[in-house]
Image: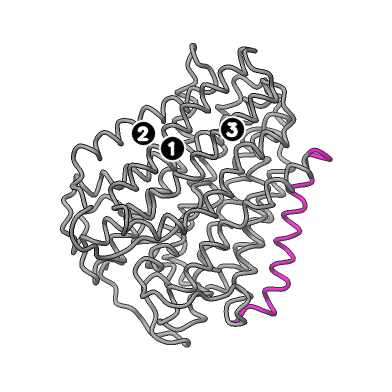
Amino acid sequence: MSAFHDEPFKSRSGFLSKWSDPKAAAVTAAHPLRRVAATALSTPHFLLLYAAMLVAAAGNTALQSVMPAIGREIGIADFWVAIAYTWSALLWVALAPYWAEKSDRHGRKALTLMGLAGFIVSMLLCGLVLVGGLHGVIGGAATFLLFAVFRAVYGGLGCATPSATQAYLASRTRRSGRVAALSALSSSFGLGTIIGPALAPLFVLPLVGLPGPLFAFSAIGVLVFAAILAWLPDDRLGRKFGRGAAMSYPSLATTATGASVVAATSPKRARLKWNDPRIRPWIVAGVVAGHAQAATLTCLGFFIIDRLRLEPHGSEGPISIVMMAGASATLAAQWGLIPRLNAGPRALILWGAPIAAVGLSWTMLATDLYGITIGFALASTGFGLTRPGFTAGASLAVPLAEQGGVAGVITSANGISFVAAPALGMALYALEPHLPFAASALLLIGLVLTGRRRLER
């Protein structure tokens, strides 16, 4: 039976929503284009909301796949290249809750369009600056300073789109059908992490070169913006039902866990603190795994260029292959493995962490594209188990009345990985290219050893 129709179940901590079951969340997310039950939206209107989130996720991960090559081509230190394109995640984490609270006042359609406009403008301006830097019109340092400024537009405004699209869909969906409908919508981020790296090399065109994917996804964003403006019904007037919630930054390291769906469908309650003793071990496990994944992902493109001795121009293809394999493995773990394993949250973490550690070690020791691809896919499979593991574990630790509160903590835990991990990873990479992978693997082994004692069975 589809997860859309599964009934909630009892747990040792009380009556629990469907999202707490990794199997239900995974299967629900696996069928994004099925007609959404219990909603007044037509399929074309739902697809407009879906496209708004998909284009942003795909564009962001496409950018991740070409930035190492662009940085090497311009001649900027790897550390500053990574910081320039990841720091927008900090703004996303800080401002996403703010925009989630504003959709009732400004209208969900209006905020969806604002977020899309932020994405379009940011990608376009970043692309122009990078073209200028690659052609010597702008100096290297000035190029990446301007690039960081224009990335802030996406981090500050683009984060409004997920919560606004959620709220728009929720307002037109019966309460009993919101979990299924919002899960289908949020699966767009996972799909985007595959589409972005897959399409990026195709848009490296003669006139614009490596920044081509930025212009391409900006143009796609314009088409989506125009379609939503023209065909999505306005919602400014009348009473607004339902609400949205902040979502994690769209990246290979932050695939959707379902936390935002629960936050959007649960009653508003007092916020939980991350150090609440009931959830602290699970949140710590999620933060540790998230840091290991974010640190190594930031270094991955540079590592591929160096290990395979590639020229910057032309390296985007191999980088995209590895990233696409990693994204596919993560989603395969969440949509395929978890529904069949019938494993609890503790088991998902204690199995996922060592699998990820082995995968990172394999990646570190590989000497060809095939080996790096297999290693990173294995690591991503492990991370695809740990993320739902800590999410479900934290949810199971609190009663139904506090599901919205714990969902907010989980979303913050996912985002905090981008505060320090990218800089730490690149600092280690500058010392020795193997260090980020070795350190992250050791961190994951430490998680297994401590998790055996601290995570509840």
Q: Is residue 2 visible?
A: no
Compared to residue 277, the image places residue 73 above or below, namely above
Label 3: state its secondary structure: helix
Q: Is residue 232 above or below residue 392?
A: above
Q: Could you tell me which secondary element the residue under label 2 belongs to?
A: helix
- Name the residue located 72 percent from the left edge and 26 percent from the top edge: 76
Which mark is drawn over residue 319?
A: 3
Closer to the N terminus: mark 2 or mark 1?
1
Q: Which residues make up the magenta segment?
A: 430-457
Q: Nearer the viewer, mark 1 or mark 3?
A: 1
Tell me what residue is drawn at x 67 percent, y 79 percent.
454
Q: Position of residue 28 (x, y in %)?
A: 33, 61
Q: Specify the amino acid type for callout 1.
A: Phe
Graded by Cα atoms within 10 Å as few (under 14), some (14 to 19) or many (20 or more), the crowding at tag 3 reads many
The kind of residue on which mark 2 rests is: Gly
Instruction: Say which residue appears at 57% left-offset and 29% top-offset.
Output: 66
Instruction: Locate the C terminus and report the quarter of the image it occupies.
Output: bottom right
Amino acid on which disc 3 is placed: Ile
| Most foreground residue, 175 or 195 | 175
Mark closer to the chain start, 1 or 3: 1
Would you name the residue on which mark 2 appears? 221
Quadrant assignment for the N terminus: bottom left
Magenta portion: prevailing SS class: helix
Give x and y (percent) for residue 298: 65, 42
Q: Residues within 10 Å of mark 1 (few under 14, many from 20)?
A: many
Mark 2 against mark 3, which lies toward the viewer? Answer: 2
> How much space separates mark 2 and mark 3, taking CA atoms?
24 Å
Q: Which residue is mark 1?
A: 119
